[in-house]
């Protein structure tokens, strides 16, 4: 009885419609080996829609995150440097810089009086 359970393997089928499109998961299937899984996937797809490529992936080769690893996906809260509130002093600094800028009259006054 246990031999029957291990005879078939679960495969995940991915396909894309055009060479430039992204792969999309289509379905899972049971097959005794990769070659048979490919034949079954081709039979299923070639009749229904245009396909540029098909990927067959054995489910046991897919890594799944456990609960502990999923905790690392939480957003880090120490990224204040990415928000604009950290740069509030710049407006004051820019205003000070503008006030110190030389205007046209001042620059022309450096040339002295022409006779």
Image (tube, helix red, strand yellow):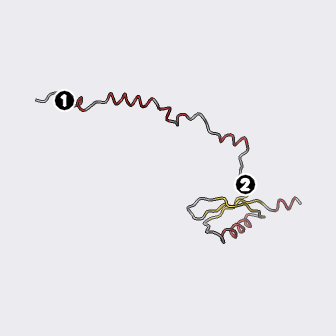
Q: For the N terminus, which image quadrant?
A: bottom right
Tell which residue pokes out farthest to the bottom in this image. Answer: 47
Position of residue 57 in the picture relative to residue 105 (left or right): right
In this rendering, position of residue 110 left or right of residue 19? left
Point 82% across, 59% down: residue? 6
Vertical placement of 43 versus 22: above or below?
Answer: below
Q: CA distance from mark 1 to mark 2?
A: 80 Å
Instruction: Tell me which corner region of the image, top left, top right, bottom left or bottom right, holds residue 69.
Output: top right
Label number found at residue 61: 2
What label sits on residue 14 in the rendered view?
A: none
Q: Please rate how many residues cluster around mark 2, counting C-alpha atoms within 10 Å: few if below 14, some from 14 to 19, many from 20.
A: few
| Residue 54 drawn at (x, y percent) | 65, 64
Q: Secondary structure at mark 1?
A: loop
Asked which quadrant contains residue 106, the reply is top left
Q: Which residue is mark 1?
A: 111
Please say if 19 is above or below 80.
below
Instruction: Kindly state the secondary structure of the residue where label 2 is placed.
Output: helix
Residue 26 location (% of width, % of height): 67, 61
Query: Mark 1 or 2 closer to N-term?
Result: 2
């Amino acid at each position: 009885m246990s031999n029957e359970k291990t005879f078939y393997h679960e495969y995940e089928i991915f396909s894309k419609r055009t060479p430039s499109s992204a792969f999309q998961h289509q379905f899972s299937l049971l097959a005794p080996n990769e070659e048979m899984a490919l034949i079954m996937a081709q039979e299923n797809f070639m009749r229904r829609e245009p396909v540029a490529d098909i990927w067959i992936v054995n489910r046991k080769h897919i890594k799944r995150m456990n609960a502990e690893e999923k905790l690392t996906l939480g957003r880090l809260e120490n990224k204040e440097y990415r928000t604009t509130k950290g740069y509030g002093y710049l407006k004051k600094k820019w205003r000070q810089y503008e006030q110190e800028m030389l205007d046209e009259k001042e620059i022309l006054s450096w040339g002295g009086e022409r006779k």
